[in-house]
Every structure is written in C-alpha cells, then in structure tokens.
Amino acid sequence: MNPKIVVVGSSNVDFIMKVTRLPEKGESTTDATFVQTFGGKGANQAVAAARAGGDTWFVNCIGTDPFAPALKQALIEAGVHVDYVFTREGETSGAALVMIGEGGMNYITVAPGANYSLTPEMVRSLEPLLRQAAILVLQYEIRPETLYACMDLAHTLGLPTLFNLAPARPFDSAYLPKVTYLVVNETEAQSLCGFAVDTPQAVEQAAEALLTRGAGTVILTLGAQGAYLASANLRQHIPAFQVEAVDTTAAGDVFCGALAVALVEGKPLPEAARFACAASAISVTRLGAQPSVPGRAEIEQFLEKAL
C-alpha cells in the first residue's frame, strides 16, 4: 500500500480577472481577461500532492450549486480520492474572487460557503482513514474548532501534521506542539510572533520563536527568496528558482502539497523543500490555481535543468 496523504481543508470556485494593473480604492479598470477555475487552499494542496505523485485523499464539504459537480470532477481528474468530499444540501460551494495584476500580485476575497460546514464531529469520524495515513495536511480556510479537532485527532494517533497557517487568522498557539511541520510566509509568521518578519534576521528570529513555542519544524516560505528551514538540528536557507511570475495565487499551496509528498517519500527536509520550491516556481508561471499545478515528471525535469 502506498502511504496516504490526507488533506483536510477548503475548495472553492475561482472567478479570476487578469488585469494589467490592480485598481486603486474606488477605481474601476477595464480590458480584463476572465477565467473561471477551481481553487481553495485545501483543494489546491490536494491537487498539488496528487500531481506530484502522492496517494492523496481530500476531506471537504461542497454545496449543491451548479458548480459543485465540476469542482468534484476536477479533483478526480487530478488523481485525488474524493470519498470524503461531502455534499451539503441547500448550501453553495466556497467561492473566491481573484484579481491578478502585474507580476502576478493579487487581491483575493473568499466566501467560505459549504467549507464551514465541515464540523469537529465529521472530523472525528475520519479516524479509520487517518490510521492509514502517513501525514495530515491542514490549512486555515475551515472553522478553527474543526482545525483544532484535526490536530487533536492526529496527535492522539501519532500522525505527523503539516499545517499551513494560511490565510493568517487568530490561532491558539497552544496547538503548536501538535504541529510537526509548520509552513508560514512572512505575514503569517508575523501574525504568530507579533513582530514584523521583513528582514533575513527577523526570519531567523521568527523561526526560533516558533520552535520555542513547540512547533516541530518551521518552514518559512519567502517568495522569490526561497524558504528558510528550522528544526531541532537544522538551520538552512533554500534559494528560490528564478522564473517570470504570471500568477502567484497558488504558490504556497503548491509548495505545501509537493512538500508533503517529498516528506512522505522519506526525502531529507532540505531536499524536500527544494522539490517543493521547484513545483511552486513552475506554478507561478501559469494563470489559475489548480490549472497551474505541475505533475511529477515536470517537476523532476525542472530540477534536472536547474542543476
């Protein structure tokens, strides 16, 4: 049996506007390009893990809106197991409005919809699945109580967790000792540490602070600067691959999904992070969240050329 990667999180219908520049407050811009795709941090990470070669199972709630069947089918086509994608009658699936400007920078607004219908009780019913898993991947587009229930169950089962605190929201740091791998960007790290994480020195200080508070391993994603890794016996910077960014929307999600696969395969953390950086670099050169996610062969070819 292949080790299972279980992702619990959100799925969204994405409505994307690609513009030459992002508007100012109160301003309207025209001549945009419109694309409708599928996203949501949980679904993006599940798709990223599946395409990177992981045996990936996704846990989520969708609605009965017209987009729901296609959303689920997109997951299936990506190779994600959807046995635990629950349909909630009378609700709408999550939705996101994404505006992308120059250099791939974006504005995003999310309506959680059925994503918030995933309850702690539903999570506790996942124990048979989690007993077969090698890692549990989590983000923060579900209700806090549901997230904490996931961490509690994984901790009880001795199951490693990869938690991406995205988007940055209030989080009970008492749960950090139940996080095996904490993945945060500078903004998310700042929300936990309480100080600006905007210099290399601050990145190192944030990592030390988060380790002190109990996180097993801290991975700070730094965009075009790569990633900084910190664990009990490791401090290392992984440089980014230089590419021309078109859309950075799913960069962090692709990183997390690919990282989970590499870790489950037994790769050392620096090698796993480099694999994840490569997958993320490929993704930002394309428009859309899930459409941007690369496959395993493409990631390996990219790494070979980068040597």
Image (cartoon, rainbow, N blue to C red):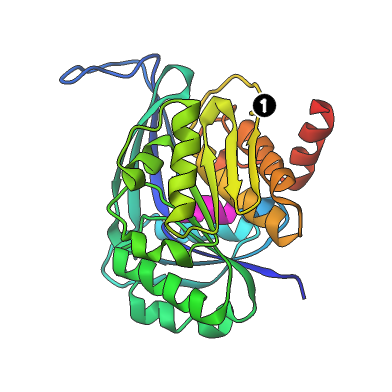
Which range of residues does the magenta coloring cover?
42-47
Q: Characterize the magenta stretch by its predominant secondary structure.
A: helix
Residue drawn 64% across the image and 79% down it: 132
Q: How many marks?
A: 1
Q: Amino acid at mark 1?
A: Phe
Residue at the spot of label 1:
241
- Helix, strand or loop under label 1: loop
Residue 151 drawn at (x, y percent): 44, 70
Q: Is residue 134 left or right of residue 181?
A: right
Residue 216 belongs to the span the image colors magenta: no
Q: Residue at x 52, y 41 (%)?
A: 220
In this rendering, would 177 be left or right of 82? left
> Viewer-proximal residue, 252 or 99?
252
10 Å neighbourhood of mark 1: few (<14), some, or many (≥20)?
many
Q: Is 302 drawn above or below residue 88 in the view shown?
A: above
| Looking at the image, residue 73 lies above or below residue 204 | below
Left/right placement of residue 7 relative to residue 89 reads right
Quadrant of image for the C terminus? top right
Q: Residue at x 56, y 30 (%)?
A: 284
Q: Nearer the viewer, residue 32 or 112?
A: 112
The answer to whether residue 81 is seen in the rendering is yes
Please report the residue visible at 33 percent of the width from the left and 49 percent of the height from the top: 95
Instruction: Tell me residue 199's x, y (percent).
Output: 45, 25
The quarter in which the N terminus is drawn is: bottom right
Residue 37 in view, yes or no? no
Give percent across and percent down for residue 64: 34, 65
